[in-house]
Amino acid sequence: MHPLKYQFYIATTQDKVWKALVEPEYVAQIYFGCIIQSTYEKGSALAYVGPGKDGDETVHVFGTLLDYEPGRLLQFTHQVGPSYLEQPDSFNPTSRITWEVEPAGSTTKLILTHDEWQAEDPNYERSDASWWFILSSLKSLLETGRPLEYSAE
């Protein structure tokens, strides 16, 4: 499986893009009510937690923080939460997510790389489809003040 890589240019400051990636009031708007739970110390746990199958404290994604440079870089391992598994002991492969934020003239470049996929990871195609919506919603939120509305259709 090849790495999933996306680059967006957003008409706002690097600081605002960074806040949208880590601050609860932004993250919840982009990730369907989820927020990040983490101390943001390298090696610490990181989880996207919010409304879902297991109630308001559903763990949707979890992992370990690999690298963190405020305002510029967020990297962590990625596994889906237990409620997404068919059985509690089902195959739950690990991949890696890297967010990079860079100035780009009067805009900010946001780079997302989702890589280190394990063979036959059942989340690969769903991730590729989901990232386009999440990134588009983040861009919309920062440029218009409103995220995109999700429709399952």
Image (spheres, grey):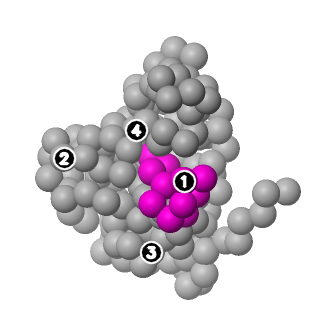
Q: CA distance from mark 3 to mark 2?
A: 22 Å
Q: Secondary structure at mark 1?
A: loop
Q: Secondary structure at mark 3?
A: helix
For the N terminus, the image quarter is top right
Q: CA distance from mark 2 to mark 1?
A: 23 Å
Q: Position of residue 13 (x, y in %)?
A: 37, 76
Residue depth check, mark 2 versus mark 1: number of the one nearer the observer: 1
> Could you tell me the amino acid type at mark 3?
Tyr
Say whether residue 46 is visible: yes
Q: CA distance from mark 1 to mark 4?
A: 19 Å
Q: How dense is the environment of label 4, judged by Cα within 10 Å: few (below 14), some, or many (20 and up)?
A: many
Q: Earlier in the sequence, mark 2 or mark 1?
A: 2
Q: Earlier in the sequence, mark 3 or mark 1?
A: 3
The residue positioned 61% from the left and 62% from the top of the image is: 136
Q: Earlier in the sequence, mark 2 or mark 4?
A: 2
Q: Which mark is residue 13?
A: none
Which residues fall within the magenta stretch?
51-61
Q: Which mark is residue 26?
A: 3
Q: Which mark is residue 78?
A: 4
Q: Which mark is residue 44?
A: 2
Q: Nearer the viewer, residue 17 or 61?
A: 61
Q: Secondary structure at mark 4?
A: strand
